[in-house]
Image (cartoon, rainbow, N blue to C red):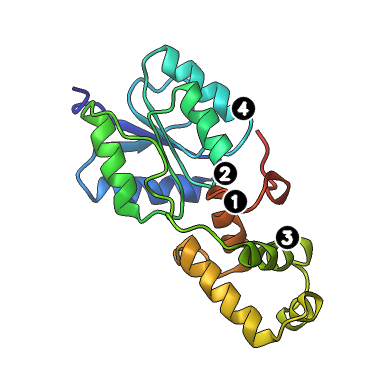
Amino acid sequence: MRGASVVGVWSRWALHADAVVDVLGSHGLRVVVVDDPWTHPGVLVAEAVMPEDVALVAQRAKGEHPTVVWGGTLPVPKVAALRAAGAAAYVPMLEHPRELVGVVTDVVAGVAVAWGESRLPTSGLTARERTVARAYLVEHAEWGRSQVARHLGISENTLKVHIANIRTKAGHRGTHTREGLRRALIVRGELDESADRLSF
């Protein structure tokens, strides 16, 4: 059991790290911000969104130092790459903070965290919803709703209904903006890789 160890939190963005420390610390975990994620001996919560972060996870796994990857809304293939590199778990930023607390608590206690797609919705988009999502979120993301509706040959009200249905299937947390919805759909495999600006 690793319960006595201090959990390290690392992010390239100090405010992100501080927020995670506050959340974990408020639930009784011993936690500190670390400057060097490569050398932290205990469990590390790392905001890993860059290509070199996979190497960080792999190096820590070789030394049997667990890494919980937090943040971003990474697509399934990139989550799989982190898992293959030896990450103990991945918690997307769309999850409620208590999900991160639960995962980190389990990893600190030496409990294996289940991987898979249990957090992803079971109902996918229809073919029409995929067309609408692609037009609204990728191909014509700079256009207003009325322009996108005209392009699709539907009314703006019909477009709004489609968007509401897409948002429901994607999950409402973090999807109130176009970018948030786009990223949520990429994570769930509903939009292809060409819609993603992150690349491992």
Please give the label number shown on residue 186: 1
63 is higher (above) or lower (below) than 127: above
Q: CA distance from mark 3 to mark 1?
A: 11 Å
Give above or below for 54 relative to 71: above
Separation of marks 4 and 3 at Cα, in angstroms: 27 Å
Indicate the quadrant containing the N terminus: top left, top right, bottom left or bottom right: top left
| Residue 115, percent from left and from top | 38, 35
| Residue type beneath disc 2 | Pro
Left/right placement of residue 138 relative to residue 185 reads: right
Callout 1–callout 4 Cβ contact below 8 Å? no
Please tell me whether residue 27 is drawn above or below residue 54 in the rendered image.
below
Q: Which residue carries the number 4 mark?
A: 52
Disc nearer the start of the sequence (1/4): 4
Residue at x 68% of width, y 68% of height: 132
Dot 4: what SS? Answer: helix
**Which residue position holds label 2?**
75
Nearest to the eye among marks 1 and 4: give it: 1
> For the residue labelled by badge 3, is the local secondary structure a helix, a strand or a loop?
helix
Task: Of the two numbered discs 3 and 2 on the same chain, state the one appearing first in sequence.
Answer: 2
Residue 16 or 2: which is nearer the viewer?
2
Mark 3–mark 2 Cα distance, whole angstroms, equals: 15 Å
The extreme top residue here reads 63
